Amino acid sequence: MTTDAASPSPAPRRPSARFLLSHPAHFIALGAGTGLSPVAPGTAGTLWAWVAFLVMQQWLSPAALGGLILAGLPVGWWACSVTARHMNVADPGAIVWDEIIAFWLVLWLLMPAGPFMQATAFLLFRFFDAAKPGPVGWADQRFKPLPGQPRWWRAGWGILFDDLVAAFCTLLAIALFMRMG
């Protein structure tokens, strides 16, 4: 959907519990409601991802978890695109699927890791995602739609991309730390 420069674009929509449950894409993109957190929704989504991963690994093999993460990328792209379009915001803070899938990837590649290493990964990931240093900042801007001409598929990918780069930076920092230690 694109907006015409002559017509005003609709006002951004704030998410609510009703919005969360109004479409399957909203439920996915808003992380089963964790994106509705009034404080630090990205952190809430990442914490939910951590707990969900620990629960899932009790029943799923590493290969099945990898398959779930792989399937979660296109599903998440769709969910983030639809939800951003319905909210009329290119990268709403309430969308936390990007944190969830990226942190699952970190944990999947890091396991079996103890609680200290998992917590370190959590803190590093949150740092890279929130502060957006270097390549994460570049990735955050790379797929932003042009003002007045949102391309929602592009916005959906952009929502995911910077978090995937943050996951890579997290894993790289941990690998460098382990190599030096």
Image (cartoon, rainbow, N blue to C red):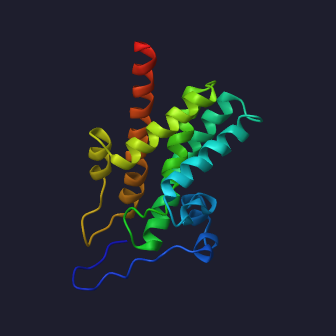
As drawn, is 151 to the left or to the right of 116? Answer: left
- The quarter of the picture where residue 177 lies is top left
Pinpoint residue 104: horizontal percent, then vertical percent. 57, 39
Q: Is residue 181 above or below residue 21?
A: above
The structure residue drawn at horizontal position 61% and vertical position 42%, both measured from the top left corner, is: 50
Point 36% across, 57% down: residue: 154
x%, y% of residue 35?
54, 61
Asked whether the viewer can see residue 47, the reply is: yes
Which sits in the foreground, 19 or 73?
19
Q: Residue furthest right?
A: 59
- Picture layout, residue 93 above or below residue 64: below
Report which quarter residue 30 is drawn in: bottom right
Give the residue at x 57% y 63%.
25
Q: Position of residue 67 (x, y in %)?
A: 62, 36
Q: Position of residue 81 (x, y in %)?
A: 45, 61
- Tell me the quadrant of the picture where the N terminus can be found: bottom left
Residue under the point 45% across and 25% down: 174
**Is 101 situated above or below 16?**
above
* Image quadrant occupied by the C terminus: top left
Judge by depth and name the residue closer to the eye, 55 or 25: 55
Q: Is 20 left or right of 167, judged from the image as shown?
A: right
